[in-house]
Image (cartoon, grey):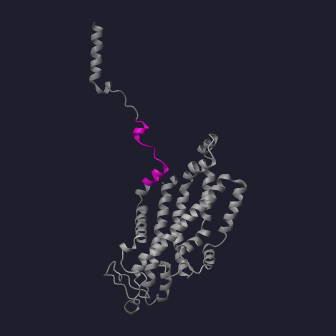
Amino acid sequence: MPDVTEETRVSTTASADPAVAAPPAAPKSSAAAGKPRSLWTDAWYDLRRNPLFVISAVLILLLLTMAVFPSLFTSASPRDGDLTGHYLAEPQYGHVFSPEWLGYDGQGRSIYARLIYGARASVLVGVAVTAAVTLFGGLVGMLAGYFGGWLDTILSRLTDTFAGVPFLLGAMVVLTTFEVRTVWVVSLALAFLGWTQLARVTRGSVISIKQADYVVAAKALGAGTGRILLRHILPNAAAPVIVVATIALGGYIASEATLSFLGIGLSEPTVSWGIDVSAGKDQLRTAPHVLLFPAVMVSITVLAFIMLGDAVRNALDPKLR
């Protein structure tokens, strides 16, 4: 009996003391802690805290809005001119967002309206060329890197052949064969020679990834070539391709402006910043604002995409974190 009482007293005392009674806390399960963070999740988390990404994203969003909905920014026509009253008229900086805000060009057209509507052609060319070179160059690089052998040799030599042609010079030769040079014609000419860099980047990325353990395991389990390429290699090889494509997009916009400046790119009646820069060079001394404002818009657009590409590269490369 005393033994039972003593045991009961000790048990009661232990139950009253939380430090003694409470069992050690079980570790939280992975489900309670949430899903494991992937490379893309970590990249998005880093991008949101990067001022470079925020600034470039705001600028690009503004440019896209201008390209899709230009009427939100101005009601003036970019093609209607008044030589009698608006010939090379000076900017009226007090009239913000009005047709006379940035002055008029040599044909009496509102420079502000042409800047707004010119975003559509530049952004459309950049996006179309980037999409085309990413799809074609990525396909060539993936096939060459994954299969290797004679296919890699043929595709690599084909890539070297196109890469040996000067980019702008080759685009000029292609564009001279067209009488009417629309947005799609210029995009086709730039994409015809611009896919080589994406092909090389994709090939190198695929070669390094196809030796990974999860790819070898997928082959051992009997996964088909298409499944391995789409489910295992493509998602893991996409990071460097996205970075190069983002930076290259700004370069394609600059190339379109350069070709239009030389008179070989977009042609009237298309509204383009490059066309306006070309028209403004003749009034550089008497009316520098005609050339200055479209040139600044080209620079800001190219800079925004380069900044975005740098931010994405820093976020996707673990060594740079």
- Determine the image quadrant of residue 52: bottom left
Q: Position of residue 225 (x, y in %)?
A: 63, 48
Q: Position of residue 315 (x, y in %)?
A: 48, 56
The reply to whether residue 320 is in sight is no
- The vertical placement of 100 against 300, above or below, is below
The residue most toward the top is 1
Residue sitting nearer the eye, 172 or 27: 172
Q: How many marks?
A: 0
Is residue 32 shown in magenta? yes
Residue at 48 percent of width and 59 percent of height? 312
- Determine the image quadrant of residue 166: bottom right
Q: Report whether 295 appears left or right of 144.
A: left
Q: Report whether 306 appears left or right of 226.
A: left
- The vertical placement of 182 against 238, above or below, is below
The residue most toward the bottom is 84
Report the magenta residues as a range. 28-45
The residue most toward the right is 150
Residue sitting nearer the eye, 43 or 65: 65
Per the picture, the main secondary structure of the magenta-coloured stretch is helix
Q: Report whether 217 appears left or right of 275.
A: right
